[in-house]
Image (tube, helix red, strand yellow):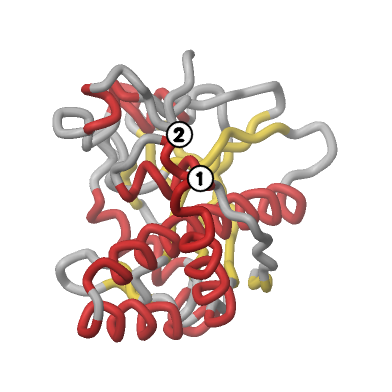
Amino acid sequence: MRRELTLTLPLDRREICRYLGCPPDEAASIEQTIAQAEQQVLQRAAPRCTFARFPLIRGENGTLSFGPKIPLEGKNIRRHLAGCYDLILMAATLGTAVDELLRRAAAQDLARSVLLDAVASVAAEQAAALAENAAARALCREGEYHTGRFSPGYGDLPIELQRRIIPLLDAPRQIGLAVTRSLILTPRKSVTALIGVADHPVTGSLAGCDTCLLREKCEWRKRGMPCGGETSN
């Protein structure tokens, strides 16, 4: 099921600063520069998403799978989907024009390239949040609840799952999204994710430093300043 998405400005400046590696209190000094980059990214973005719902299959020893016998490996995703009986797969992308903007900037101006990449990453996260809401509205029935999204590569959920999600969603035809042999989404500024569905309130595994793949080298964590993804369970 395909949907067009509408991004709004301003983007999350705290998250942009996190990607740039600068403290949030320094955002004011580069606010105009960030605003210009936001305009450039959104002018080229063609945000859209697609999603579908599948039954969860619970096997022996707590194993999970869905669709045509696709396993969900890792304790983090099992915890995230605890109490859920169905699964929503979703994918969202900013489109190829944003990739082209980033490629040109990388060849011409390194500092501008870094800023645009940070802005585009935050724009992709906004698109993912919009896609999550659209998927829940379209596919969850009255009286159902859903978790937040959980992406391949997060925690111990293998990133190789991208290879199964993309064809299941018919993402190349629906939104122009593919995955390379090296498991990179193309267009780059894209997100895939899983959302659990249940008949009672569920939260899933809330994001935090403990399961973040960047926890050992995160400069914000070293300063004792968790990023916007840090939430207490």
Count neighbours of disc 2 (C-alpha within 10 A) and say few if under 14, some if 14 to 19, many if 20 or more.
few
Q: Residue sitting at 75 percent across and 56 percent down?
A: 138
User: What amino acid does circle 2 point to?
Assistant: Asp
Q: Are marks 2 and 1 in contact (CB under 8 Å)?
A: yes
Residue 211 spot, x, y in % from top left = 29, 27
Indicate which disc residue 223 carries.
none
Q: Quadrant of the N terminus?
A: bottom right
Q: Quick one: which residue is furthest to the top in this view?
A: 233
Residue at x 44%, y 64% (from the top left corner): 120
Is disc 1 surrounded by few (<14), some (14 to 19) or many (20+) residues within 10 Å?
Answer: few
Residue, far front:
29
The residue lying toward the viewer, choosing from 227 and 34, is: 34
Which residue position is annotated with label 1? 28
Is 208 located above or below residue 2 in the figure?
A: above
Q: Which residue is found at the position 45% from the left and 67% from the top?
A: 168
Q: Quick one: 1 or 86, which is closer to the camera?
A: 1
Left or right of 215 on screen, residue 140:
right
37 in relation to 141, above or below: below
Kind of residue sitting beneath label 1: Ala
Side (left or right) of 102 relative to 172: left
User: Looking at the picture, how far across and down is residue 31, in whole percent?
Assistant: 51, 54
Q: Is residue 32 left or right of residue 102?
A: right
Task: Please give the residue where the numbered disc 2 appears in the rendered image.
Answer: 25
Q: Within the image, what quadrant is residue 116 found in?
A: bottom left
Label 2, label 1: how far apart the Cα atoms are: 7 Å
The percent position of residue 42, horizontal first and vertical second, equals: 57, 73
Secondary structure of the residue carrying tag 2 is helix
Does dot 1 land on a helix, a strand or a loop?
helix
Q: Nearer the viewer, residue 113 or 65?
A: 113
| Point 65% across, 64% down: residue | 7
